[in-house]
Image (cartoon, grey):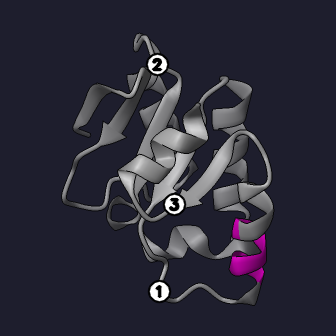
Amino acid sequence: MIIEERLKDGVRYNIVVDKQEVIRDESSALDLIGALYYSESKNVIIPTIVIVDEFWDLKNTVAGNAFQKFVQYGIKIAIMGELENAGKSLKAFMIESNKGENLFFVNTEDEAIDKFK
């Protein structure tokens, strides 16, 4: 998993820069948490292109369990990009998440940075 640490507008954050799907399940999400452990930042941007489609099936609880692990470790997450096949339940989840302080769905890196402030 390739992760870059960046600083922009006074906000330090990490971004997953892989071009292949690396987040497949709760275990791979834990791998990302482990990779972030020694980072100075507890903010991470995860592009949708690195997450398998099955991850977003809310019926299997994988996404919810994985996101809960990030929160438990004090990591703020911004999911960046479009989820073209998002159903009604996932869209509702995205709206509610964007009202909180730990998990955001954004279109751009700059939007993510604003959420991390």
Quarter of the figure with the C terminus: top right
Counting residues from the start of the chain, the first of labels 1 and 2 encountered is: 2
Where, by quadrant of the figure, is residue 52 drawn? Answer: bottom left
Where, by quadrant of the figure, is residue 93 drawn? Answer: bottom right
Q: Is residue 42 above or below residue 101?
A: above
Q: Which residue is mark 2?
A: 41
Which residue type does callout 2 highlight?
Ser
Question: In this orientation, which residue lies closer to the viewer: 60 or 53?
Answer: 53
Which residue type does callout 1 highlight?
Glu
Image position, residue 78 (x, y; %): 53, 48
Q: Which residue is mark 3?
A: 106
Name the chief secondary structure element in magenta: helix
Asked whether the residues under the numbered discs 3 and 1 touch, taking CB atoms below 8 Å apart as contact, a structural biologist would say no
Residue depth check, mark 3 versus mark 1: number of the one nearer the observer: 3
Which residue type does callout 3 highlight?
Val
Disc 1 and disc 2: Cα gap in Å?
A: 29 Å
Counting residues from the start of the chain, the first of labels 3 and 2 encountered is: 2
Can residue 27 be seen here? The reply is: no
Instruction: Identify the secondary structure beneath mark 1.
Output: loop
Image position, residue 35 (x, y; %): 38, 25
Q: Is residue 103 above or below residue 10?
A: below
The residue stretch that appears in magenta: 89-94
Image position, residue 83 (x, y; %): 49, 78
Where, by quadrant of the figure, is residue 105 drawn? Answer: bottom right
What residue do we see at 30% from left, 61% from top?
A: 21
